[in-house]
Amino acid sequence: HPFHIPAGKELKGKKPRDVSSWFRLDAPTTKENLSRLLRALQLRKAVLLEGSPGVGKTTLVTALSKASGHKLVRINLSEQTDMM
């Protein structure tokens, strides 16, 4: 794949995690969105994902963080989210 990110601190010298039991990343749209996300991460700047609720934005980022060993910090700006 032409885009990659370095392993995060969570891996600590281990192999990348196999997330296939938790997430399906082989669907055509998911592959395309993952490629776009990896391409955006090459800029080493914050990435803002936008889209309708329930389309998989959070799931995609969660899968990528688990597979690569990066800690995920989630900030939800949706007006539809209840804050408790």
Image (spheres, rainbow, N blue to C red):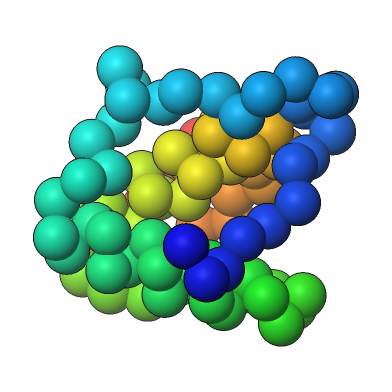
User: Horizontal and vertical percent for residue 17?
Assistant: 55, 24
Instruction: Work out whether 42 lies above or below 1.
Output: below
Say whether residue 41 is left or right of residue 54. right
Residue pushed farthest front? Answer: 1
Q: Can residue 52 be seen in this view?
A: yes
Residue projecting furthest to the bottom: 43
Q: Is residue 5 above or below residue 83?
A: below
Q: Position of residue 9 (x, y in %)?
A: 84, 33
Residue at the (67%, 24%) spot, across then down: 15
Q: Nearer the viewer, residue 2 or 35?
A: 2
Give the image location of residue 49, x and y in percent. Answer: 44, 72
Residue visible at 30% across and 17% down in the picture: 21
Q: How many numbered callouts?
A: 0
- Residue at (84%, 24%) from the top-left corner? 13
Residue 14, x across and y down, in percent: 75, 20
User: Which residue lies at the image location 69% right of the left edge and 33% below the top edge?
Assistant: 69
Name the residue nearer the viewer: 47 or 39. Answer: 39
Residue 84 in the figure: left or right of residue 23: right
Left or right: where 75 falls relative to 60: right
Q: Work out whether residue 79 can be spotted.
A: no
